[in-house]
Image: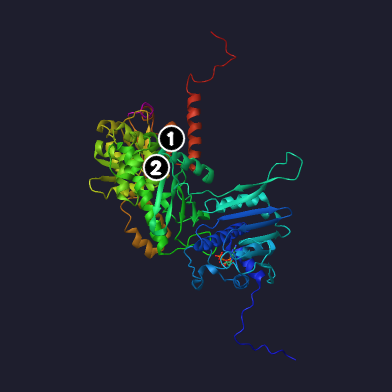
Amino acid sequence: MSEDLTAAGRAFQVDLRGVVDLLARHLYSGPRVYVRELLQNGVDAITARRLHDADAPARVRLRPGPGGTLEVTDTGIGLTPAQATELLATVGRSSKRDLDLGLGREEFLGQFGIGLLSAFMVADEIELVSRSAVETDEPPVRWVGYADGRYDLTVLPRDADVPAGSTVRLRARRDAEHWLSADTVVALAQEFGSLLPVDVAVEVPLPDVTGGAPATAWRRVSEPSLPWLATYPDEAARTAALAAYCERTLGFTPLAHIDLSVPLAGLTGVAFVLPTAVPPGAGSRHRVYLKRMLLGTHVDDLLPEWAFFVRCVVDTSVLRPTASREQLYGDELLLATQEALAAQVRAWTVAALTASSTGLAGSSDPDLTAAAGMPPATTRRIVSTHHLALRSLATTDDEVLDLVAQVLPFETTDGATTLAQVRADVGEVLHTTRVEDFRRVAPVARAQGMTVVNAGYVYDDELLARLALRPGWQVRELRAQDVAQVLGAVEPHRELEVLDQVQAAAAVVRPLDCALVLRSFEPAEVPAVLLQDRDGEHQQDVRRTVAAQDDLWGGVLAGFVSGEDEPARRLVVNDANPTVRRLLAADPADPVLVAGVRSMYVTAVLLAGEPLRAREAELMNDAMSVLLEAGLTRPGAALPDETQEDV
Ligand SMILES: Nc1ncnc2c1ncn2[C@@H]1O[C@H](COP(=O)(O)OP(=O)(O)OP(=O)(O)O)[C@@H](O)[C@H]1O
């Protein structure tokens, strides 16, 4: 016989275990948030009571007990038996968004009506004993919820010893006792509730010195006011207090702090400047409080990527949390807030940069004077520690770009100097875009009096490309020809004199995709330099592609290959170098000439900062043995023969 399952208008049944599992695994970051949810309910209840009675006490007390119990008592609004039935027995029911009850969401931390369930992550039973502080004729009530979805509700006698407000009691599930231990509760209450505007304290055991009954004390975990809004005797005291707060909370001593304020989002706070450089892309980890309850310590997206040199601590009363209460909800308001915060950090950054370039005496801009108010050594330290962040910002911001060009040192062939200085000295800013290119040309360029900027480091080539578009700047990437041009040609008679040797030497490097030319240049100690020809490199690429294509495409592409099979690199041999001159005096067929050219080539590759390929290392070895052999067998170069007697 089959049962009739037809139904209409029935209510959903909820399997609480499934819901709790869902919360624990997918919504909350872990059981630890149960403390936050209990604190939040206590604070919200106090807020609700204070809407009726502004002078009502504002206390939350947490008492971890023996055997894994925890009692959380608040002096909040409490519940009548009817409210307890309605609010606690329905998952998703919340008094905090119920306008019928005359309450709006703005005042409260909670909104979803699921927070209390988080206690089931650590306990199988939640007991809540409550007495309404507003409907004082109502009796107190005791509600007990079980993780399997049942609950008991008992109306207590009117004269029962239950003060106005609520007490939640938990008994830890086996395996979850540590979550309710005094140490853990203190740590969690401090983490989530340190900035709460109510008096939050945890009962902690005192060390037993008398041998009597164990003594306890209340340890206050909340601060009376936000550290950045508190009143201090003077600016120096405020800076010191904020630095101490940063040390306690974020674990570092800041180089400086930047005050933040976005009234639209009810946001105030501070950005602390990190004392050491962080790699770009390290992510920004900001500490965000929502109505003074910790939302998260790793909230992303509060500031743009370039601001990776600061860590913020902010409190907002208007931005909304995601349901996990661990990130901010991405709405229009958050976007506007991010923009406003970025503008404030940027204004400060510009001020710091300007201050470090000029000293800024008498500036009337408050940001500028604030930054300039820092000791010059501090401004310089900030700029040198966080130059990468500044370079990154300069790639998208012209004002910062101009300042960076004036203030930040770049590596050049004249030593570290600013781009503005290079412009003032030589007009055009010539730069390489790879560190290897710079290493390759630096010694020669330096000796020729050419100024070349190394823009091979992160952000620098983007930065120079942007600078090239700024009025008044002439910026160009260095080409091989620029260097080749300044390398002096050799007199025609000398060229003729060593023609055979140069041709023999060219034949040595040709299989290594390298041409060879003879020039005379300073410094004379450098026997040869390797020049990379970008056009040549491109030609090489095309040639490789042509070789790999079928006939039709190969034919089309071959049209792009210009002229002869030009090598991509040029070994420029220095006729001013004594070793080179001796080498060029050798017989073109002498194996020493071949070995000498090979070793010159390898030295030039290394000087250019290029890695040595296996083939080149092999050549070096061969060259060494030829040179050694030649050296050892030279007449008069043999080791003294010990058997021979002195004559
Ligand atoms: N300590 C308390 N004092 C008075 N009322 C309470 C207390 N704790 C819970 N409540 C009532 O129970 C309701 C449900 O609480 P719960 O923590 O599950 O959700 P919430 O706080 O409303 O929202 P959220 O899920 O965002 O935390 C609350 O809206 C509130 O009315």
Alpha carbon of mark 2 to alpha carbon of mark 1: how far?
34 Å
The residue at 58%/64% (across/down) is 133
- Please state the horizontal and vertical placement of residue 19, each as a whole percent of the image: 63, 69
User: 156 above or below 519?
Assistant: below
Question: Looking at the image, is mark 2 or mark 1 nearer the viewer?
Answer: 2
**Left or right of 501 in this view: 322:** right
Q: Which region shows up in magenta? A: 576-580
Per the picture, the main secondary structure of the magenta-coloured stretch is: helix
Residue at which label 2 appears:
387
**Quadrant where ligand 1 appears:** bottom right
Count of numbered labels shown in the rendering: 2
Residue at which label 1 appears:
603
Q: Amino acid at mark 1?
A: Thr
Secondary structure at badge 1 equals helix
Q: From where the camera sits, is residue 380 visible?
A: yes
Question: Mark 1 packing: few (<14 Cα in 10 Å), some, or many (20+)?
Answer: some
- Of label 2 and label 1, which has the lower sequence position? 2
